Image (cartoon, helix red, strand yellow):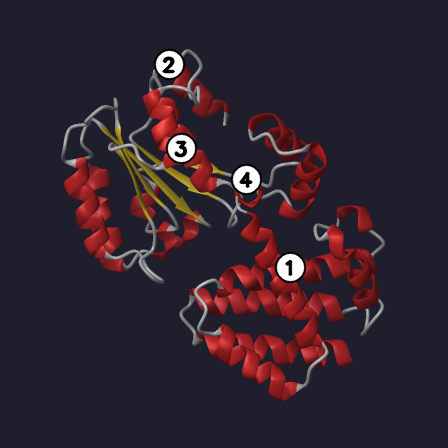
Amino acid sequence: MALLARALATGHTAQAYLLTGAPNVGKTHLALELAAAVNCTGDAPPCGQCWSCQHIARGTHPDVTTVEPDGARIKIDQIRSLQRDLSLSPYRARRRACIITDFHLATTEAANALLKTLEEPPAHALLLLTAVDAGLLLPTIVSRCQALALRAVPGAQIAHALATRWGVPEEHAALLARLSAGRVGWAIRAAQDPAILADREQHLEMLLALLHQGRAAKIAAAEDLGKRDDLPDIIRLWQAWWRDVLLVRSGCEELVANVDYLDALRQWAARGSPHSAAVALRDAETALTRLEQNVNPRLAVEVMLLGWGIAMAA
């Protein structure tokens, strides 16, 4: 990050950046901040007050485009549209910026098409790619980007930022920081959209219900969950739950993320064998890997849920 700060201070930013890190750690937020900093007309970029910064924050800047997966993949038509946009001179900005989120989900055709732009980018272009891991991208794409790996942010820093920059009450900011498990992007979105916390509660209650139900109910739930676009996010939440169960069982309650479910975590930590939570955690990771490999979602969830039933009965 110090390297990025120096580049912004001297005006020598790269034409392409690759931001990697776990889901919701803040990659897209940093990409927007970088696009704002490059085009800011204020005294301390990104100032957040000038016309450019405000329109980038609202998603209405004519020279800043965000490309997200269309369904499960980023497709070649999306890259071709991006290339047409980048060929145009900026309307009001210094640099025409394009943010491509989750580029590890790009099709081979889309990745190869973008490679041509990375090899000879327009002078006014700023490309900002995000991905969970650079190893999931073509090496030729990675080599043409300035790579920045994002790590989990300490909870105290997240709470301070929520309170001072986004005006979140201190007590609520502290709770969001704890629930975020270091994912600043998630914390910001949760502060701005109450539905995120409501969905989280619904999904945790679903998990607790499923853990008490038999095979037939788990198979039926897998059928429904397999149709959901947010399935990976749900599994990651459940994965965090099992991590917390493991932490409670190990006597490390102060590290628990889902602190508002501490009583339930204690109950489940007392169940099963000493290794049950670790097995459940591994099963969740396996399910996520299978989804990335385009395994049938229903089947991936079914195996995970049935595995949890076996693990907790051991």
Which numbered disc, 2 or 1, marks the residue that appears first in the sequence? 2
Foreground residue among 170 and 38 = 170
Residue 178: x percent and y percent? 69, 44
Mark 4 to mark 1: distance in Å? 17 Å
Q: Quadrant of residue 234?
A: bottom right
Q: Are marks 1 and 3 in contact (CB under 8 Å)?
A: no
Which is closer to the viewer, label 2 or label 1?
1
- Residue 133, compared with residue 241, is above or below; it is above
Q: Position of residue 131 (x, y in %)?
A: 42, 48
CA gap, disc 2 and disc 4: 29 Å
Callout 3 secondary element: helix
The alpha-carbon separation of the residues under discs 2 and 1 comes to: 46 Å
Identify residue for label 3.
Answer: 57
The disc, 1 or 3, on the residue closer to the chain's N-terminal end is 3
The relative height of residue 26 versus residue 270 in the rendered view (above or below) is above
Task: Name the residue that disc number 4 marks.
Answer: 188
Amino acid type at image mark 1:
Glu
How far is mark 4 from mark 3, CA to CA?
A: 13 Å
Which of labels 2 and 4 is toward the front? 4
Give the CA separation, mark 2 to mark 3: 24 Å
Q: Residue at 14%, 33% (x, y): give it.
A: 88
Could you tell me residue 127's position as x and y percent? 30, 36
Q: Is label 4 in a helix, a strand or a loop?
A: helix
Given residues 119 and 231, the one toward you in this image is 231
Q: Is residue 240 above or below residue 168?
A: below
Crowd band around label 1 with a 10 angstrom C-alpha radius: few (<14), some (14–19), many (20+): some
Residue ID at (25%, 57%): 75
User: Which residue in the protein does label 1 denote?
Assistant: 201
Element on which disc 2 rests: helix
Q: Is residue 309 left or right of residue 35?
A: right
Circle 4 crowding by C-alpha within 10 Å: few under 14, some 14–19, many from 20: many
Residue under label 2? 10
